Structures are given as C-alpha cells and as structure tokens.
Amino acid sequence: MIDLYTSATPNGWKVSIALEELGLDYETHPILLSKGEQKQDWYLALNPNGRIPTIVDRDEGGYVVFESGAILQYLAEKTGRLMPADRRGRFDVIQWLMFQMGGVGPMQGQANVFYRYAPEKIPYAIERYQSETRRLYQVLDRRLADREYLAGDYSIADIANWSWVSIHFWAGVDIDGMPHLRRWLDTVGERSAVRRGVRVPEPVEFNLEKTDESAREGASMLVTQDSR
C-alpha cells in the first residue's frame, strides 16, 4: 500500500495517473495548498521542500519519496513497467522526463503566474514565459511527428509531459499548428487510467473567466506552489 499526499495539480496528476496505470493500491491524502497544509511541520517531516506530491511506500517500511519526477522513476522501477529495462531505452525516457521537469513545468508554471495571478500585469513577463512554453511544445510536436509516444512505448515521460501540456489553455498558450502534439494529447487523454488519475484527489472544473481570490481557492491545481 502507498500513501499519496497530493493536490489537484499537474504534478499531483503525474503520480495519481502512474498509480492508476500500474494498478497499485494507494490511499489518497489531500493536501490543501490554499490553506498552507504543505508547510505544516508534520508534512515538512515527509517532504522538507514543502511541495506536493509525496508518497510513503508502506511495503518498504514507510519509505518516503518526494519530487514528482523521482516518484515516477521509483514507481516504474518498483513495478518494472512504464520504463524500458535496457539502458538506452531507460535514458530515452529519462531525457523526456527531465525535459518536463526542467523545462515545461517551470516555464508553464511561470506563465500561469504572470498570466493569471500576478497583481500587476507585466506584458514582458507574460510574453516571455508564454513564448518559451510554446517553444517547448514545438519541441514535443517535432518529436512526436514520427512516433506515437515520446520514447518508444507509453511511459512515465508521456505521463509527466501530458499532465502539464493538457492544461496549456490555462497559461494562455495555444497549440495551433502542432498536429502531432494535439494527436498525442488526445491519445493519452483517452486512456482510462489517465481519466481516473486526473480526478485525484478531486475533479477540477476550469472557469476561464474567474480570476478572483475565490477562483484561486476553488481550483487548487492553478496554484503553482508545486511548480517543479
């Protein structure tokens, strides 16, 4: 059994989707980011960085893993699934996982902040982060031009990138002219495990017209406190 401490954010989705894909038994413990639960002492004892998600593997004596990319690798290695066994195949997956961790997540997270939440609209910052996010999407689109998934078979690399790119609209970034990326988004999004995973710990409804404080609290996935 795995304890999953999470919120309805792209990084949270990565792990809940993986757990659903792998069919592992897990118990969900929602963390209310808007109430600062991720900064409470009991949670910091699990994850000193005060971010979500975090897992505790009871089958391994309560072993704790934090950072969403590390959790994905841990689960893949634990089960022998969602990542190839051979070295080159593994690093094909790891490359694209790191692409999301170091690029798509941070850039799109900043686009979210400046486009949706910043008390002062700074056109330079909005354009900078939206443009860089779109550039990264174009890299993905080119990669997917001649393959169904990012690194051979469906893998944790697809889960990680999809969890962010699927909400591109919230950052104000369009995917026009990227047919391969759009096809991949649809393909991954149709998987039953993905559909279940994005409902953990609760479904999120987007209201693109709401930008006030109540909207922030009502849709915790839009808070970028877990943006790595």
Image: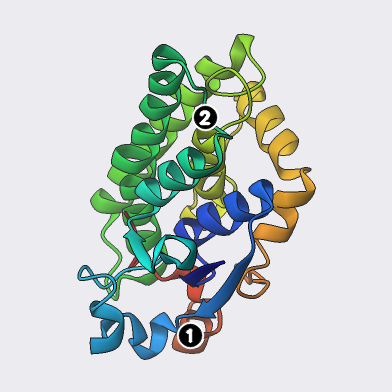
**Vertical order, 219 against 97 (above or below):** below
Give residue 123's quadrant in the image: bottom left
Q: Of residues 150 and 184, which is closer to you in this image?
A: 150
Mark nearest the camera among 1 and 2 is 2
Closer to the camera in the image, 220 or 120 = 220
Residue 1 coordinates in the image, percent (x, y):
57, 66
Res. 131 visible in picture? no
**Residue in front for this viewpoint, 113 or 32:** 32
Task: Residue 187 in the image: state x and y as whole percent.
Answer: 74, 34
Q: Residues within 10 Å of mark 2 (few under 14, many from 20)?
A: many
Residue matched to label 2: 83
Among the two numbered marks 1 and 2 on one chain, the one whose residue lies closer to the N terminus: 2
Q: How many marks?
A: 2
What residue lies at 46% left-to-right and 38% top-to-bottom? 77
Instruction: Identify the residue at image location x=67%, y=19%.
Output: 148
Q: Residue lying farthest left?
A: 48
Answer above or below: position of 18 versus 219: above
Q: Amino acid at mark 1?
A: Glu
Specify whether residue 12 is in view.
Answer: yes
Against 215, is 2 above or below?
above
Badge 1 element: helix
Name the quadrant of the C terminus: bottom left
- Residue 40 coordinates in the image, percent (x, y): 27, 88
Residue 217: mark: 1
On residue 118, which mark appears? none
Residue positioned most to the top:
146
